[in-house]
Image: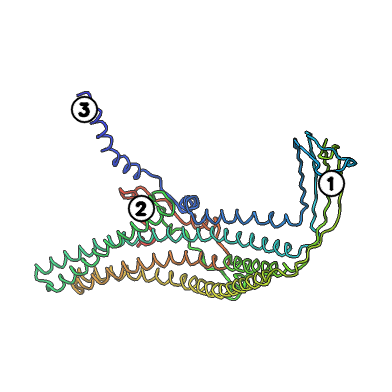
Amino acid sequence: MGGFRPVMKKRLLFALIPTVLACAARQAPAADLKSIFLAARAHDMRYRQSAASYREARTLGPEARSAFLPRISAQANTSYNDLTSRILGGSSTFVFPSGHFTFNAHGYGVSITETLLDIQALYAYRAAGDTIRAARSRYDLAKSDLVLAVCAKYFGYLLARDDLHLRRAEERALRAEYASAMHSFHLGRAPITDANEARAQYEAVRAATLAARNALRLARARIERMTGAPAHGLWSLDLHHALPRPRTGVLAADEAHAFDHNLVLQAARREAAAAAAAARAASAGRYPTIRAEAAYSYSRADNGEFGFGTVLRDKTIGIDLNLPIYQGGELSAKSAHASAAAFRAHVAALRIQRRVRFDVRQAFLNVRNGYDEIRALKAARAAARQALASERLGARVGIRNNLDVLRAEQAYYRSRRDFARATYDYLLGQLELKAAMSHLTAGDIDRLNALLKPPSASSTPSNGHAATGVGTHP
């Protein structure tokens, strides 16, 4: 019995772990758009990789600049020598003795080299600067893409949540209509075809509800994959805040602004400039290089094979000229390769410029159309609500049947889903337009976060996910 109780305690503890985790998940604090963005920025590997690439590229500047700075080197040596010398065939008049010598030798020296002319290094330095600026643009682009990705997944989750809520409400309404049609059939007031059609529509919406539930789970999984943390109680869009109006401006001005500030285009242009500078550096390999050199050295040997020691001091100063004449075709091959790479980068920049023009135009038109579509769908939603009320009133007085009410129910919920989808698409469209024109920052997250509201206790189900949103308001 002594060993039985610890085993039972362990089993009880493991049995309570899922319950404790579930309670912790239900009690997890709600997350707004800004907190999701901060978690994604700390977890996203693409963003961290771009930061590491930019950090690596920044080391190219000092490396290229070192070609124009003085190079100073020093050296020193000391040695113990054990020397045996014997002169063979020497005459008696040979003054250098033979014998065994032991002595110490030491010395030191310093040299300075300064580049006076190196055209290849100059172009390489310019190429390094363009590469650093391109890496900086890529890093800022990664931050902008992360903002857009977070907002897209966040609004995708809100849309999926609103869609599930509306599907459930539509399912309840159609179930009531189906029950009413069966009741009317049993009383002899309606044919069985009305009941059958009501059941068919109800089963179709029931299947759509299952699909919407799965879509919500996938949308939540995408956010959790992006942040590396559970996503619970995401804030909903507050309809009391007016949606931001489209920017005032013309398409041509937005395109011109994008040509100067679009990060993708800036990175491509700077990469093309770096490739062109690298091509000029490869071509400048045939030019001469001139360097100034100065050196001082001291050496001392206490003895030697000739029976005496030496002390040497050497001071030199001069100019070194190096002119490559023929290197086996290596310089021409490198120059041709670099020129081809520069042309490829130039063509890539032109292709991206055309794509940026189309992206700006597409985002510009989507934003303008989206704002008008929201106003139209808002009016359509109100009209559908009034039509549903009229159909229900007509069914009660006997001038409308259950099928008319059924169609009005479906039209009403369809208008609510369309309005919710158009609202989220409009907010994303504004972000896409700004991203196409320049780039997105954390300030855009703050502006969108101000449009959200925390889920209330009355509108939060037991699973910790709010059920209200832009599409749930009548």
The CA distance from mark 1 to mark 2 is 80 Å
Query: Which residue, given by chain and number where applicable, does mark 1 sit on?
Result: 296
Q: Residues within 10 Å of mark 2 (few under 14, many from 20)?
A: many
In x, y percent, where is residue 467? 34, 55
In x, y percent, where is residue 365? 50, 74
In x, y percent, where is residue 166? 31, 62
Amino acid carrying mark 1 in the image: Tyr
| Relative to 306, 354 lies left or right | left
Check contact, mark 3 vs mark 2: CB within 8 A: no
Of the 4 image quadrants, the one containing the N terminus is: top left
In what element is the residue under mark 2? loop
Q: Is residue 444 above or below residue 280?
A: above
The CA distance from mark 3 to mark 2 is 45 Å
Query: Which residue, given by chain and number where applicable, does mark 3 sit on?
Result: 4
| Relative to 468, 306 lies left or right | right
Check contact, mark 1 vs mark 2: CB within 8 A: no
In what element is the residue under mark 1? strand
Look at discs 3 and 2 and give the one toward the viewer: 3
Total number of numbered discs in the rendering: 3
Amino acid carrying mark 2 in the image: Ala
Question: Which badge, 3 or 2, comes first in the chain's sequence?
Answer: 3
Q: Is residue 246 above or below residue 71?
A: below
Query: Which residue, given by chain and number where applicable, does mark 2 sit on?
Result: 466
Amino acid carrying mark 3 in the image: Phe
